[in-house]
Amino acid sequence: MKQFWKILKFELKNYFSKKVFIIVTLLLVAVIAAVMFIPRITSLFESDGNADSADAESSAASDVMLVKADAGENAEVIKEYFEAEFPEYKVELTDDDLDGIKAKITDGDAECAFVLTSPTEYTYYVDNLSMYDQNTAVADEALQSIYRINAMTASGMTPEQANEVMNIQITGKTESLGKNQMQNFYYTYIMIFALYFVILLYGQMVTSSVATEKSSRAMELLITSAKPVAMMFGKVISSCIAGLTQLAVVFGSAILFYNINKSYWSQNILIGSIFNIPSGLLVFMLVFFILGFLIYAFLYGAVGSTVSKLEDVNSAVMPLTYMFIFAFIVVMFSMGSGEVDNILMKVCSYIPFTSPMAMFTRIAMSRVPWYEIAASILILTVSTIGIGVLSAKIYRVGVLLYGTPPKFKTILKLIKKS
C-alpha cells in the first residue's frame, strides 16, 4: 500500500506541475468567465448608451407602414389590428394612388405598404425584400381574424361576442410522469462530451507516460522496486484525480460565475436548466464518470506497456479508441432520436465499455428500474477491478516485450506462464 501512495503522489505532482495542465485549466476558466459575464457587460454598455438607444427607438418608431384599404368602414378596424400585430411600425392609412405609395417607399418615407383590393386580397409593397420578412404571414392572420369577425356579425352576433369567440384562450399544461427528456437532454449531453474528451485526453496521457518509461528503460528499474499492481493503479488513479480536479475547477468556476450573474441569465431557460441539475442525477453522473474513466485508463495503460516506441502509441490504442467512439455514436444517435430505451442501448447498458454512457443516458432521459441500474453499476465495478488487475499483469509482462507490439494471444500466454 505504501508503494501505491508513493506512486500516486509522484504522478499527481507531475500532472499538477505541468504547464500545459495549468494553462489549459486557466484558459477554460477564463472562457467560461467571459461567457457568464457577457450579459452583465452588455447591460453596462446599454446603460451607458441610453442616448444612442433612444435614437435607435426613435428611428424604429419612424418606420412607417402604409395601409390602403378599399374596404370602407373596415379601414379603421384594419388599422387597429395592424397596430397590434406590427408594434415595430407606425401604421398609417393612406388615400394615395399606387404610384404615390410606391414613390414613398422608394424615397424612404415609408418602409412598406399593404394595398387591399378586397377583404381577402392584398398586395404587399417593399423596397428591399428581406429573406426574414414575415410581414405577409402576420398580415394574413390579422385579415383572417377581421374577415371572420365580420362574418359573425353579419350572422347576428355582436362585435363583442364575435371578438370574444375569436380571441378565446386555450390553456394547456403537460405533466410528465417519467423523465422530461428535453429538460435532461443538456445535462446528459454535457456529461457524455466531458467523458468523451477526458477519456481520450487522459487515456492518451497514461499510454504515453507508460510508453515513455518503457522506451527509456525506466520501467525495468521501477518494476524491481514496486509491484505492478501498485504502479498501474497509482498511475491510473492519479490521472483520474487530475482529470476530476480539472473538471471540478472548470465546472465549479462555471457555477460560481453563473450564481454571480444569475439575475442576468433569468430569461435564458437553457442556461438555467443546465445549472439546476438534480442531486440524484449528479451522483449517478459521478459514479459512471469515474468508473468509465478508470476502465478505459487501465486499458490504455496496459496497451502502453506493450509499446516499445512512442511512435507506435497511436496505432496501438486505435482499437480502444474505435470501441469508445462506437459507444459515443450509439448514445448520440439514441439521444437525437429520443428513443434512449431501444434494444441496442439496453444491451450497451450492461457492457462495461459502453455502460458508462449508455446507462447514464437512460437514467437521465427515461425511467429505468433500480435493479437494472444496480446490475449495471455492479458489472461495471467488478469489470473495472478485474481489468485493473489484468492491466497490472500485462504491465509486468510488457517490460520484457520490445520490438513489434505483440498480439493479445501472446500476451495472455505470457501472463499464464508468469
Image: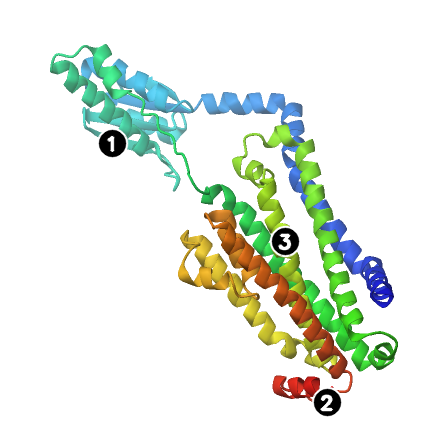
Q: Of helix, strand and loop, which one carries label 2?
A: loop
The kind of secondary structure element at disc 1 is: strand
**The residue under label 3 is which amino acid type?**
Val
The reply to whether residue 97 is in sight is no
Disc 1/disc 3 C-alpha distance (Å): 63 Å
Q: Name the residue under label 3.
A: 287
Q: Residue at x 40, y 23 (%)?
A: 89
Residue 237 coordinates in the image, percent (x, y): 75, 62
The mark that comes first in sequence, 1 or 2, is: 1
Element type where label 3 sits in the image: helix
Residue 82 is left or right of residue 305, and the answer is: left
Q: How many residues crowd mark 3 within 10 Å: few (<14), some (14–19), many (20+)?
A: some
Q: Residue sitting at 42 percent across and 38 percent down?
A: 176
Residue lying at the far left of the rendered structure: 155
Q: Which residue is drawn at 61% across and 56% down?
A: 288
Label 2 Cα crowd, 10 Å radius (few <14 / some 14-19 / many 20+)? few
Residue for badge 2: 403
- On residue 415, the disc is none
Relative to 148, say whether 230 is above or below.
Answer: below
Q: Quadrant of residue 150?
A: top left
Residue sitting at x 83%, y 80%: 216
- According to the image, label 1 marks what residue? 123
Q: How far apart are marks 1 and 2 (CA)?
A: 80 Å
Q: How far apart are marks 2 and 3 (CA)?
A: 39 Å
Q: How many marks?
A: 3
Kind of residue at badge 2: Gly
Q: In which quarter of the image is the C terminus?
A: bottom right
